[in-house]
Each structure stands twice: as C-alpha cells, then as structure tokens.
Amino acid sequence: MAATDHEVEEAVAKAREDDKSRRQVDGFDAGKAPPFRIGDVRAAVPEHCWRKSPWRSLWYVVRDVAVVVALGAAAAAMDSWAVWPLYWAVQGTMFWAFFVLGHDWYLLL
C-alpha cells in the first residue's frame, strides 16, 4: 500500500521536529556556538595556573607512584575479600591518573 503525499509530508515534518528536539534539550543547542570565547576562559583562570613547572609536575608523578605502591602494600597486608573491591576502585582511579599523564605528557613540557 503506497503512502499518500500528505502522509509522506507528515513523516518528514515529524522527523525534522524529532531531530530539532534532540539537538535542543532544555534550551541547549549543541549546534550553536558557546556564549563565551576561549579568551574568556583564560581570563577567568588565575595567571599562576598557566605557569608551567617541571619540578611541580615531577613531584605529582612521584606522589602518584608512592600512592599506588602504598595502596598495593596496604591491600596485600590486609588481604581480605572486603578490601579488594575498594582497592580496585581506588587503584583504578590512580591508574587513570597515569593514563592522563601519559596521554598529555607533552603539555607539561
């Protein structure tokens, strides 16, 4: 059974409306430019946050490695079924920090 022209037009209008409503959730339109510029973001962040410090960066790496080692030692010493799930969650967070560090290392230099 073939659709009438009116049914086809209705289906197309409905599809367009659905697409529009998907893009505009609670007044947000992902296709629109944001109401701010990158310069506004940079101006909102304090100047000292933009200064690169290799020593501070290395300190964070050393601190993260120490936390990973300490968490592993503590979990191994406790060796309880109740401790291991907590260890996995916390250690996963720390390893995520290593992933970010490895992914963005060139920004630290």
Image: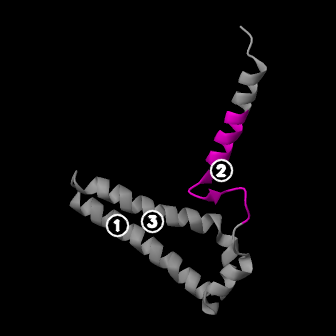
Image location (x, y in percent) of residue 93 = 44, 62
Q: Callout 2: few (<14), some (14-19), or many (20+) C-alpha neighbours within 10 Å?
A: some
Q: CA distance from mark 1 to mark 2?
A: 44 Å
Q: CA distance from mark 2 to mark 3?
A: 35 Å
Does residue 68 appear in this view? yes
| Amino acid beneath label 1 | Leu
The type of residue carrying mark 2 is Arg
User: Where does label 3 land, which residue?
Assistant: 94
Asked if the residues shown at circle 2 and circle 3 are in contact, with their CB atoms under 8 angstroms apart, the answer is no
Give the amino acid type for the residue marked by disc 3 in the picture.
Met
Q: Dots 1 and 2: beta carbons under 8 Å? A: no
Q: Would you name the residue on which mark 1 appears?
A: 71
Residue position for label 2? 23
Q: Position of residue 105 (x, y in %)?
A: 65, 71
Residue 52, can we see it? no
- In the rendered image, residue 28 lying in the magenta stretch gets the answer yes
> Measured from the top left, where is residue 85 in percent x and y?
30, 53
Quadrant of res 41: bottom right
The region drawn magenta spans 13-33
Residue 59 in percent (x, y) is at 52, 83
User: In terms of depth relative to the viewer, which is nearer, 12 or 28?
Assistant: 12
| Disc number lying in front (1 or 2) | 2
Whether residue 73 is in magenta: the answer is no
| Vertical side of 20 occupied by 43: above or below | below
Quadrant location of residue 108? bottom right
The quadrant the C terminus occupies is bottom right
Residue situated in front as seen by the camera: 43 or 8: 8
Q: Residue at x 63, y 53 (%)?
A: 24
| Residue beneath the point at 49% across and 78% down | 62
**Quadrant in which the N terminus appears:** top right
